[in-house]
Amino acid sequence: MKKIDLLKCLSIITKDGLRTQKFKNSHLQLISSAEEGRRGSVFAYRSKANMVKARGVVLTSVESLLENQDQFTHWTPNTYCYGSYSDAGRRITRGHSEDNLRQINTFYIDFDITSAAEEMTTGDILTASLELGFMPTLILKSDKGFQAYFVLSESAYVTAHSQFRVVKVAKAISQNLRNYFAQTLPVDLTCNHFGIARIPRTDNVEFFEPDYTYSFQEWLDWSMKQSELPFPSKKPNLTVISGSEGVKQIDDERGEYQRWKSLDGKKQRSFHASFSQLLFRNRSRRV
């Protein structure tokens, strides 16, 4: 597994949705509660069995997430306005519904391997992402496969005034993204777009590149043009784009990816800038 800075990882995902430190009994004391202002909530669960029964906790700070690192298995990476409990013992969570979403921080895809014929690796996700032109920020190992996070560079905020239009548009983008990967890989198309996902831990991160984030507008532009993209019916053979220039672009990207894989962690981080420029240049030519 890839060793990562969990604080950085969680902060990139949650952005300004949560407080940095706990409202009470904080061990950080970096800034006052008044300075942090009003923020949102996420829900976290210590096992899949608890998640199914909604037996979890409501968290309002990154500090509280870190205090429980490797104890939670699932969470809601997109932030809600509030969270509460439906029982006197404060064990059954409530509030994780679309009309309570505060902001959308990330899209995520669940790759669910159900048979030997669907065997796949992190490399398969990265290769398909290269062809798409959008790289995942994070890939987690799960019990039956992987989950890939495509984190937004800036959160998309939800307002009742706009009749939750952001949620509707984001859901369409998320569905198009899942449909794209489902052409070549085993994707769970039934899970909630902005519900519960695997949480990053020290023992499940396969890939993390904090600079691989894209704006909501970039995703919207892609989603609106997605019908123009070539959707292969089999695993990518890296030659699906017609014309010698298109093939060369894919070959270039594959060569750069192979170079990236051969480097150690420190060199990988310094290499990502030129790699990102190649992806952006090629994606601009295709759109």
Image: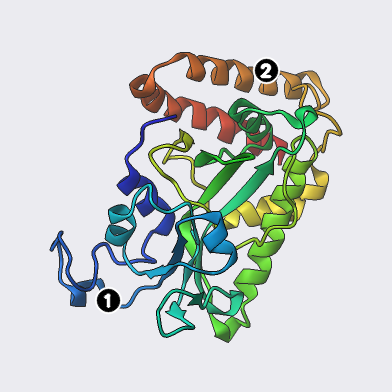
Q: Residue at x 15, y 71 (%)?
A: 32
Q: Quadrant of residue 241?
A: top right
Q: Residue at x 47, y 62 (%)?
A: 155
Residue 196 seen in this snapshot = no
Q: Quadrant of residue 130?
A: top right
| Quadrant (top left, top right, bottom left, bottom right) of the C terminus | top right
Residue 186, image x and y in percent?
75, 39
Residue receiving disc 1: 37
Q: How many marks?
A: 2
Residue 224, image x and y in percent?
74, 56
Nearer-the-camera pick, 230 or 110: 110
Q: Is residue 199 left or right of residue 147?
A: left
Distance from disc 2 to disc 1, alpha carbons, whole Å, reads: 49 Å
Residue 216's place in the image compared with 22, above or below, is: above
Residue 216, image x and y in percent?
56, 57
Q: Residues within 10 Å of mark 2 (few under 14, many from 20)?
A: some
Amino acid at pointer 2: Asp
Q: Residues within 10 Å of mark 1 (few under 14, many from 20)?
A: few
Residue 236 seen in this snapshot = yes
Q: Tell me, for residue 251, which label it has, or none.
A: 2
Residue 250's place in the image compared with 118, above or below, is: above
Nearer-the-camera pick, 270 or 90: 90
Q: Tell me, for residue 60, which label it has, or none.
A: none
At mark 1, the secondary structure is loop
First in sequence: mark 2 vs mark 1: 1
